[in-house]
Image: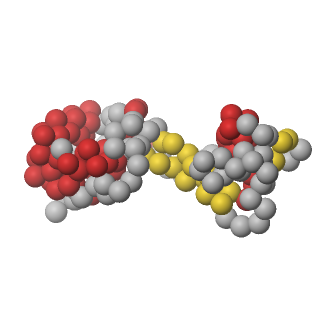
Amino acid sequence: MVKSTTGIPLDVTYGSQNSITSVTSANLFAEFFRSVFEHAEVPPSQLYVDQFPNYDIRMQQPQFSRVDIFEALRSVDASKGPDPDYIPPSFVKNCAASLATPVMLIFNHSLMDGIFADVWKLASTTPIFKAGNTYNVENYRPISILSCLAKVPRCIQLFG
């Protein structure tokens, strides 16, 4: 019975596979989480966006304001640990005044181009124990840790 510093045992099992190192344990968790992930299939009868009629409707391009971004950055939970981008939320919160303008420009550019930065789509996956034998990988569920900057737009209401 070997425990890691995170409280997750290093000597875990998945099916007939066993592990006693952090690398092989991580690989077993990854294999299990990958196996339970399901790709959503779109029914063929469902309409796709390109099948809708084209109406010439002009809408004002939504934009984030510096104040909105500043308030969202100040509301970041500073007690959390670093995200996949290694930027501690405490840094984001404490530097909100300096970060508000560049983050606003990035988000507004993203809205205009319809592209969200790939780096902000990354997540760190952490196993959380559910119940049963702690040494069985199948008794864990994955949670995804996202960048706090990637979550800022959801804190802002664009169409107030």
Give left or right: position of 11 versus 156: right
Work out whether 7 lies above or below 10.
below
Image x and y of residue 64, in percent: 16, 47
Residue at left offset 28%, top offset 49%: 90
Nearer to me, 104 or 28: 28
- The answer to whether one can see residue 50 in this image is no
| Residue at x 12% of width, y 45% of height | 97
Q: Residue at x 23, y 50 (%)?
A: 93
Query: Furthest-right residue in view?
Result: 16
Q: Is residue 109 above or below residue 42?
A: above
Front-most of residues 130 and 54:
130
Residue sitting at x 17%, y 47%: 96
Q: In this view, does 64 lie above or below 130?
A: above
For residue 158, side relative to residue 121 (left or right): left
Scheme of image coloration: secondary structure
Q: Is residue 109 left or right of residue 80?
A: left
Number of marks in picture:
0
The quadrant where residue 136 appears:
bottom right
One can see residue 24 in this view: yes
Q: Tell me where residue 94 appears, x and y as whole percent.
A: 20, 48
Q: In which quarter of the image is residue 10?
A: top right
The x and y percentages for residue 36 are: 70, 50
The quarter in which the C terminus is drawn is bottom left
Residue that sits furthest to the bottom in the current view: 131
